[in-house]
Image: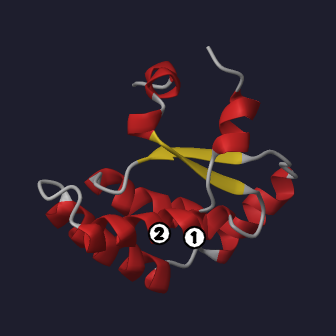
Amino acid sequence: MKNLENYWNQAISFDQYLKDIDTVILSGKNPEFTPYYELNKKRIDRILNTFKAKDSQSERFEQLNFSGKLLIITEGWCGDAAQSVPVIYRFFEKYLPIKIVYRDQNEELMNQYLT
């Protein structure tokens, strides 16, 4: 098992994650997954533009005084991630450093968190 700090150091920003999705769409490198990337990019953009946490939720999190980091395991083709990652990002972006690791490139890490 790799140290989580190693994953953190190799992880990318949320902005880079969005750029990577665009690159996959434009490159046509992965034609069987391209429709999923395209749909998910639309979902992500919509959620980023519309999601707003309730003030009570933000206040509650601020009261916790949490000072960690958030490492998200995801893929641009994953429909569930397209619905949840932008919400998680929007909620925590002002509180915590957030980075992304790709599920398919980090099988050992992914296997540690299968539910």
Q: Is residue 24 left or right of residue 6?
A: left
CB-based contact (under 8 Å), mark 1 and mark 2: yes
State the colouring used for the structure image: secondary structure
Q: Is residue 77 left or right of residue 1?
A: left
Q: Give SS at disc 1.
A: helix
Residue type at mark 1: give it.
Asp
Q: Reply above or below: 39 against 107.
A: below
Q: Position of residue 110 (x, y in %)?
A: 46, 28
Q: Reply above or below: 88 against 48.
A: above
Instruction: Tell me, for residue 15, which label it has, or none.
Output: 1
How much space separates mark 1 and mark 2, taking CA atoms?
Answer: 5 Å
Q: Nearer the viewer, residue 18 or 115?
A: 18
Instruction: Tell me, for residue 89, which label it has, or none.
Output: none
Q: Reply above or below: 66 against 20.
A: above
For label 2, count other residues whose C-alpha is less than 10 Å away and answer few (under 14), some (14-19) or many (20+): some
Q: Position of residue 36 (x, y in %)?
A: 20, 61
Q: Give SS at disc 2.
A: helix
Residue type at mark 2: give it.
Leu
For label 1, count other residues whose C-alpha is less than 10 Å away and answer few (under 14), some (14-19) or many (20+): few
Which residue is the extreme one toward the top?
1
Instruction: Determine which residue is flagged by label 2.
Output: 18
Q: Is residue 20 left or right of residue 25?
A: right
